[in-house]
Amino acid sequence: MNVLEARLARLALKGDQQAFAELVDLYQDKLFHMAYRMLNSRQEAEDIIQDTFLRVYKNLDRYDETLKFSTWIYRIATNLCIDRLRKRKPTYSLDAESTDHEGLDGYSMIPSDNRTPETELLLSDTQRIIHAAIASLPPKYKTVMTLRYMQDFSLQEIGDVLDMPVTTIKTRVHRGREFLRKKLEHKL
């Protein structure tokens, strides 16, 4: 797979649009799932994936073929997710009236979660509780836990994606697990 990805990246760099389309096909769903897990928003995850592929296309000349392509593209997507999470922090009260929309407060602006009966059936109570607990983690633990347990990355791969030592990743996984254990001990 690494040889194929490197070859596709070389061809895309030379202007081969079909090769770039194949790279998109290889990673689009995987990156979307990772971004969705981190952001809990389909729209934001789609935006992140689009931004990721734009950055990949613009920066293909910077790709180091001695590294795995997956590590490079996941690093781009993960960094974009982290940036989005940082920007997302609320700077206003939901109780305050919106300045853009007269007569509406912040609560009325929150989009509804339109889940279909089929998806409700597929998600067990346990899964929902665990996903909610992971979603409530601070971003530095949420990122590591999502890559480790939802994307099945090794500790080394996570370290490569986040550009951190494996020992730091181990610490964050441990602390993330402790946070989840405390959060879930009375719910499960």
Image (tube, grey):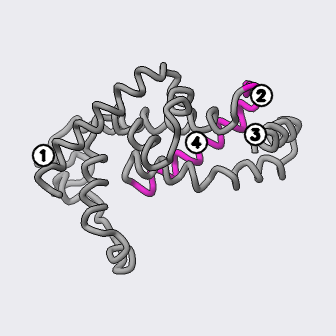
| Marking on residue 96 | 1
Q: Earlier in the sequence, mark 1 or mark 4?
A: 4
| Marking on residue 155 | none
Query: Please, what is the three-letter code of the amino acid marked with disc 3?
Result: Asn
Residue nearest the observer in this picture, 58 or 140: 140
The span from disc 4 to disc 3 (Cα, nearest Å) is 23 Å
Tag 2: Cα neighbours inside 10 Å, few (<14), some, or many (≥20)? some
The residue at which mark 3 appears reads as 2
The residue at which mark 2 appears reads as 65
Say if the magenta span includes residue 51: yes
User: What residue is rendered at 23% in x and 36% in y?
Assistant: 178
Question: If the image is split into quadrants, where does the C terminus sit?
Answer: bottom left
User: Nearer the viewer's eye, disc 2 or disc 4?
Assistant: 2
Helix or strand or loop: what does disc 2 sit on?
Answer: loop
Helix or strand or loop: what does disc 4 sit on?
Answer: helix
The span from disc 2 to disc 4 (Cα, nearest Å) is 22 Å
Image marks 2 and 4: residues in contact by CB distance under 8 Å: no
